[in-house]
Amino acid sequence: MVLGRGSFEIARTVQREELGMAKRTLVAVVAVGLVAVAPLACGGGKNLSRGKAEDLVRSARPWLAKPFDSLTISSEQFEKGARVGLWSRNGDVSPEAALYIKSVGEYGGKKMLLLVDTYRVEFEVTGITDAPMSEGKVKEIEYSWRYIDLPIIAETFATSGGSGGLLARLYDDGFRLAGGDSWVYSRDPYAASERAKDLIAELTKSIAERRDQEAAAKAAADRARDALLAQSKTPTKRATRFMTLTGLYRDEKYEIALTDVSIDDGVPLPAWRAHNVWFGFIKDFKKGTQLNTVNNTVKPCVNVHALEHGVSVGGGYEFASEPERDAFFDALTLELAAWRAKYSSLLN
């Protein structure tokens, strides 16, 4: 804006006055229309209209104009959904709820639902007031907000909306944003429709029925596995017997029995060493040799690596000759392969 000669004179006068006198002079000038002053943006002078305040809110939150597919929910509402089975506490969405909810997660320390359908947020300026000690140059804008077209599944978990606020400072061209931004969720729940309540009831019932079916199926599978496990430990044919050496304190032969489910140590082994090696415990086995501590000679053996709950239950089976060792090794190879083929499901 270009000022005329008279206006320059007024400006020079204002500069010479003290601040209070300058303000009074400017008011007088405006009042008598001696100079044309361009209107301030967002409401001229110190006045800020609600329409202009809404423009400021929109500029501070441009995403309000876009559709939303995520919904922030409280920890209590998250637990509510987990209890009825819509999602797990790990955030896994149930098959029934997946028609309405893509995922459940956390962002910035808040629980959130990612929805299949979108909704909008609408706000309204509810008040404009002068900030304390600002002489009208800083305005506090308060507004309320609410959900529009909220997806039916979200009605049960949303709040009734909330409130917000921001500050606007007066400049020569009008009010501009000056921070103080806040966005608060109401503690009041959203007024869910009857359709929304019916949907939750239907989903809860479907989830409960599915869980019952899954529990029954698991119980049946567990019973079948227990029966198969018992069967896998019960010999079904006559055992093949082999002579081995103790290799401990005396060079003495003893008998072991190879069944179609286990290796059974016999007597006269010391009681602390006698045990049964179930095929399900065997990890691997191989031919080898080991030192006989009684006569300090090397004897052929079959080393069986077997673990029962992490504890070794196998060992080295020592034989007087290689043919005896090889016969045991070949028989164990055939019996174990047949057992694993029959009870492969137990190995998973």
Image: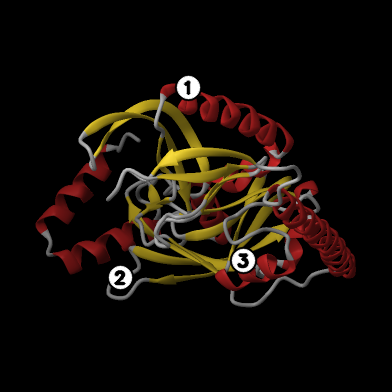
Q: Is residue 252 above or below residue 146?
A: above
Q: Secondary structure at mark 2?
A: loop
Q: CA distance from mark 2 to mark 3?
A: 46 Å
Amino acid beneath label 2: Glu
Q: Which residue is mark 2?
A: 135
| Left or right, residue 221 beside residue 248 | right
Q: CA distance from mark 3 to mark 1?
A: 70 Å
Quarter of the view holding residue 89? bottom right
The answer to which of 4 and 280 lies nearer the viewer is 280
Quarter of the view holding residue 218? bottom right
Q: Which mark, residue 78?
A: 3
Nearer the N terminus, badge 2 or badge 3? 3
- The image shows residue 333 at horizontal and vertical percentages of 58, 27
| Left or right, residue 28 beside residue 14 | right
Nearer the N terminus, badge 3 or badge 1? 3
Mark count: 3
**Which residue of the protein is positioned furthest toward the left in this rendering?**
16
**Can residue 158 be seen here?**
no
Amino acid beneath label 3: Phe
Amino acid beneath label 1: Pro
| Left or right, residue 237 beside residue 280 | right
**Can residue 296 be seen here?**
yes
| Left or right, residue 93 beside residue 213 | left
Nearer the N terminus, badge 1 or badge 2? 2
Q: Secondary structure at mark 3?
A: helix
Q: Residue at x 46, y 43 (%)?
A: 306
Q: Which residue is mark 1?
A: 323
